[in-house]
Amino acid sequence: MRSDAYTLSFPVWVEFGTDVSEGVGPILDSKGWQRPMVVTDPGIIDAGLLDGIERSLESAGIEYVVYDGVEPNPTTAMVEEATELLEAEGCDAIVAVGGGSVLDVGKGASLLATNPGSISDYEVTSGQEVCAGPIDRHTLPLITIPTTAGTGSEVDYWAVITDEDREFKMAIGQPPLSPGGPYLGAEVALVDPALTASLPPRQTAATGFDAFSHALEIHVSAVSPPIVRPFTRHVLGLVPEYLPQAYEGGDPEARKRMLFGSHVAGICENLGGFGAIHSLAEATGGMYPEIPHGEAIAAYTPSVMEYNSQAVPERYAEVAAAMGVEVSGRTDEAAAREAITAVERLIERVDLPSGLRELGVAEDDLPVIARKATETIEIHDNPRAADGEDLLEIARNAY
Ligand SMILES: [Fe+2]
């Protein structure tokens, strides 16, 4: 395929701005899915975010079971537990309600419900051609309902699941490899900004910055086709404008814009690649499951930008312009430096950690993190080649 060619496959039915509590029961009913398993976590239940969804299911006469064992940085054990429950209960669909961790466990269970083996059999490994995954049977129908503006997992073909034995976050993923073919992901995504309204400031900042990093990495990635850039530019402008307002709470318009941005970045994930930011953050999250993904992302972003911008300053000049920085009359290199400064300001503005030390990462672990980062699939998409030594240097700069 020519380097500027692309394939677009988009089987997910999306309703953005829908009232989920109105929609979910009738959608299941219209599809003939009569016994769903709701996958969620205790925080979602405590925040009352399941209430409207349960009412909707009940008024449609749909009996459901709830799996609420998901924790941040979800593991193979959680996917197996959820799969066992849905098999024991004879469920015919999954409704995943939560942040990225919940949606990814929903995806994992939907995969194992219809395909043989364990979740690690479906890992897309480093060196393997990306998206050559062996999912050959349609996954169990999945409805995704995000409650954070960050992951984009409601529409993308990826799940990140930690293999506890290896302390490694596996990338599980597959787009439809032929028209109508099986894929990992939702059949229906219901995206309702009201469900993000009660997210506390710290999680709002971390998940919102994660969405920004998706647009950033996809924008500069070596493997992204040009079609993504109008979309990534939009998200790169939208997050700096609205994340501070969403972080301070209250503003429904800012919440809505942030959810739209994370959602658009999620769509772009199906077209483009990531890079060293996610590579290093996933390697760190595998070893430190208590660190929220978005906080690890924030810690690495400026150092990775510094490293990459030497190879593709023109892309980072575009990032600066998208973020609203005045770049006319500047060289690409100067504009790229402005992009890094603007990102550092955004991180500071929403009180995200400025380095790994602040996150409690041991300095002695940096060599292991750098080595594990070389084993991620994301590193192959980075715009500048980076080996273990380079990644260690980046990690030291991010400390
Ligand atoms: Fe991410």
Image (cartoon, rainbow, N blue to C red):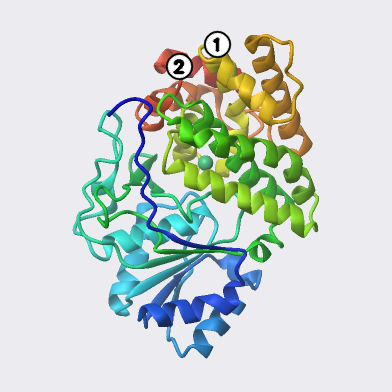
Q: Which residue is found at the position 37% from the left and 83% from the top? A: 34
Quadrant for residue 232, please give it: top right
Label 1 sits on residue: 310
Quadrant for residue 23, please give it: bottom right
Category of crowding for the residue at label 1, using alpha-carbon neighbours closer than 10 angstroms: few (below 14), some (14–19), many (at least 20): some
In the shown orientation, is residue 87 left or right of residue 196?
left
Q: Height in image: 259 above or below 241?
A: below
Quadrant containing the C terminus in the rendered view: top right
Q: Height in image: 187 above or below 121?
A: below
Q: Which residue is found at the position 62% from the left and 33% from the top? A: 298
In the shown orientation, is residue 110 left or right of residue 244?
left
Q: Amino acid at mark 2?
A: Arg
Category of crowding for the residue at label 2, using alpha-carbon neighbours closer than 10 angstroms: few (below 14), some (14–19), many (at least 20): many
Residue 121 in the image, given as x and y percentages of width and height: 23, 48
Label 2 SS: loop
Q: Amino acid at mark 1?
A: Gln
Question: Considering depth in this image, is 70 or 49 the residue closer to the camera?
Answer: 49
Q: Which residue is found at the position 26% from the left and 53% from the top? A: 179
Residue 76 tag number: none
Residue 65 in the image, given as x and y percentages of width and height: 42, 79
Tally the numbered discs. Answer: 2
Residue 18 in the image, given as x and y percentages of width and height: 60, 68
Quadrant for residue 16, please give it: bottom right
Label 1 SS: loop
Question: Considering depth in this image, is 304 or 132 the residue closer to the camera?
Answer: 132
Mark nearer the N terminus (2 vs 1): 1
Q: Is residue 396 visible?
A: no
Q: Height in image: 214 above or below 48?
A: above
Label 2 sits on residue: 384
Q: Is residue 178 visible?
A: yes
Q: Answer yes or no: do the residues labelled 2 and 1 have beta carbons within 8 Å?
A: yes
Q: Height in image: 185 above or below 271?
A: below
